[in-house]
Amino acid sequence: MNAPARINSALNVRDQFPAIANWHYLDSAATAQKPQTVIDAITEAYSRDYATVHRGVYERSASMTASYEAARAAASNLIGGQPNELVFTRGATEAINLVAHTLPKEGRNRVLLSQLEHHSNIVPWQLAGYEVDAVPLTPDGEIDLEAAEAMLTEEHRIVGFAHVSNVLGSILDAGRAAEIAHSKGALLLLDGCQAVPRLDVNIVTLGADFYAFSGHKLYAPTGIGCLWGRAELLAKMPPWQGGGAMIEKVTFEETTFLDPPARFEAGTPHIVGAVGLHAAVDWVEKLSLDAIHAHECALVSECRDALRNVGGVTLYGPEDSAGIVSFNVDGVHAHDTATILDDAGVAVRAGHHCAQPLMDWLSVPATARASFAAHSDSSDIEALVRGIEQVKRIFSA
């Protein structure tokens, strides 16, 4: 077989990531490393600019409040929304929980999910009392939208799909999913955790009603995430948590609440997380998400070809997966593969990836997963291949 084409980092940003020097980090789907510009923004926010938001009348508090709201504007603009439609959360998990527990059911008690969903898009619906129906997948691991259309009924309040699978990297035809959901009066929630770091997302074009994503997969800090929702839907949803900053008036007899998004942001928020998110959004927009996606697609193609050349490796998901390659070395548990790769200086994820129903569909207990980022290049793939060759030598001895 011909050797796969080598991809040098056309984005030329590897040296902007201080945490990956001499390390082949292939676990960006779990959490992204941070470029220096994001680290600097966090440091400055804590050391030079720090103050509370939405409370103080002094100058620094007002300045930090402006920075916090500028982050909201940047995050909403990134996905084509408006600032009054974007709620800051701790991450996509909290965002989906918020919708599951506050969206009026209007007599509909079912949710339509898919076989490849992350647990964060399954468990919240169960806890909120929904009956769950799961759409099967196509043979190459994409959500079967024809089956979804056949399964959807007027009992379904919401359809919740991953925009990009965290295991297979398969990309949903979100526009078609929206058409299907709306044909029966259901709403569409998209889990955008794996999409936002690598796709140019426009929620208006997609037709989604809710969109959730986490900052830490977008080169931003942990503990900050976003829920975008159509303004008229957010206005109908009651508060999920109570506390400061989300109230209009409190008495012991009655409390009234602010309009969204403040209604859903009880307590002191993750101020510096929002500042870091803004820096991360600026960083990816400067590179352009189209360029990041093209770069990662080239690396996925190179990686899949390289692993096929190794032999004895099973690949999962579609050929055109977005930034993610899941695999198993034949006869070797994914945890053993990942442990040996770690000794070789390569970091991959191994396990069920918080997607146990998908593992059941694949008929495996776990997979190893290599996931790329803007800083990835061919040296990471070469190290991965050397590590897998070592795995095969150890287990054939």
Image (tube, rainbow, N blue to C red):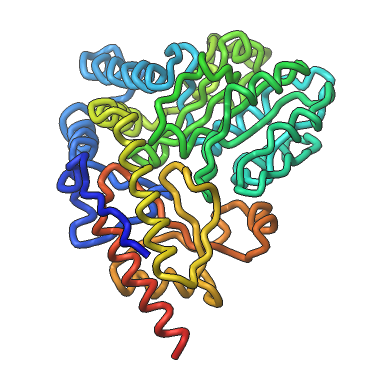
361 vs 248, nearest the viewer: 361
* Count of numbered circles on the image: 0
Q: Is residue 317 above or below residue 351?
A: above
27 vs 174, nearest the viewer: 174
121 vs 222, nearest the viewer: 121
Q: Quadrant of residue 56?
A: top left
Q: Is residue 80 visible?
A: yes
In percent of width and height, residue 358 lies at 65, 52
- At a point 28% along the width and 53% down the height, the residue shown is 5
**Which residue ends up furthest to the bottom in the rendered image?**
397
In percent of width and height, residue 31 lies at 39, 47
User: Which quadrant is the N terminus positioned in?
Assistant: bottom left
Q: Is residue 220 visible?
A: no
In percent of width and height, residue 318 lies at 53, 47
Q: Quadrant of residue 274?
A: top left
- At a point 24% along the width and 61% down the height, the residue shown is 23
